[in-house]
Image (tube, rainbow, N blue to C red):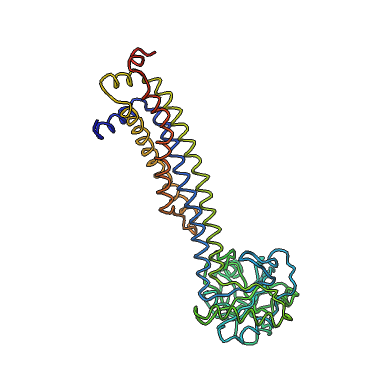
Amino acid sequence: MRPADVVRFAWVSLRGYPARTALMGLAMAIGVAAVVILTALGDGARRYVVKQFSSLGTNLLIVFPGRSETAGATPGMFIGQTPRDLTLDDALALTRSRAVRRVAPLSVGSAQVSFGGRSREAPVVGSTADWLAIRNMQIAQGSFLPPGDPRAASPVCVIGATVRDELFGSASAVGQFVRIGNRRFRVGGILVSQGQHLGFNTDEMVIVPVAAAQAMFNTNTLLRILIEARSREELEAAKRDVTAILQARHEGELDVTVVTQDAVLATFDRVLGALTLAVAGIAAISLAVAGILIMNVMLIAVSQRTREIGLLKAVGATPAQIRLLFFAEAVLLSCLGAMAGLAAGFAGNSLIVRVYPVLPAAAPAWAVAAALVTAVATGVLFSIMPARRAARLDPVAALSRR
């Protein structure tokens, strides 16, 4: 029996039972579509995080208060209690390292921002003039925080695009005075609209000198310190210097965590990569369910097609050829279902990108290939029992429907 005859016979058999074929194909298509869509979401989330961190710039170090022995989160980020907090003097001391180019201390809080009769709650970030270059941010109008002694609480601020629109409308904001909390600040500049970035919406942000933020929130501590090394080659040297300087300032105790941008990216990449594999595995379970459905329906089909199988054996078909015919049906059905599932998966992927344009959702090639291979392998695997049962039928009994 030629391969073309096998495929033609399998196609005629599937067309002979359209409802059954459609249901089995639908089950397979749902499994493949689930794999494509879920892996697209997982891989899209991973690439989104990588893009967000990459936009911070290169050669970046981040100092957190509290000591973490792993590459994970630091205790001070969650419980708010560490052996010793970071201070502005700690940040200034780091500039002594020859491997360090810029240092940006961060103090973060929230306050009411008002102008005239308009007001809104906004996140307030206290930092220095170097934060603009470290974060790769741009100014749309005016200028950023003035350079100089970070201990000086200059009454100047920089506002995001949304804050400007809500407080000033179409009027000019640069040079105007706004009230942040119980203090007055002159608007020195307006940030270029960037939207969400690492959990912060920069368009809704207000930036003030770090000393002014500490006075506003009645604290002398820092949330973290951002450091830019002079070059990628000096990144490890900068990390060693920062660790040594802070340990010496903290009475010989290493109670801070210094991480590189690459380490943070690698951690997120591992976590989100494992998550993508996990959701792909969960989605693949539906392919196993579809395979069980194929096996059950084909077992029923064997009893319904006994005359057909008996006739094939009567004209000389061997048991191996009977098994091949059933395998061909399973492969053809799986391929049709897989193709329909791919089409549905890519359509769902396109819908996700339209609804959430910031998420670069796209199914990786390995997931598409794995879904196709798993669908076909599942169809063949679960057709073994029906094929063997059909091949063992006695032709005389089959023709007499006994």
Q: Is residue 155 left or right of residue 48?
A: right
The picture places residue 159, in percent across and down from the top left corner, at 59, 73
Above or below, comparing residue 389 to residue 265 in the picture: above
Above or below, comparing residue 106 to residue 391 in the picture: below
The picture places residue 370, in percent across and down from the top left corner, at 42, 47
The picture places residue 358, in percent across and down from the top left corner, at 49, 59
* Closer to us: 182 or 255: 255
Which quadrant: the N terminus? top left
The picture places residue 256, in percent across and down from the top left corner, at 67, 74
Dividing the picture into quadrants, the one containing residue 253 is: bottom right
* Closer to us: 24 or 125: 24
**Can I make out residue 115 in this image?**
no
Which quadrant: the C terminus? top left
**Can I make out residue 57 in this image?**
yes
Above or below, comparing residue 338 to residue 241 in the picture: above
Residue at image point 46% right, 35% down: 290
* Closer to us: 128 or 270: 270
Q: Is residue 238 left or right of residue 293?
A: right
Residue at image point 51% right, 64% down: 50
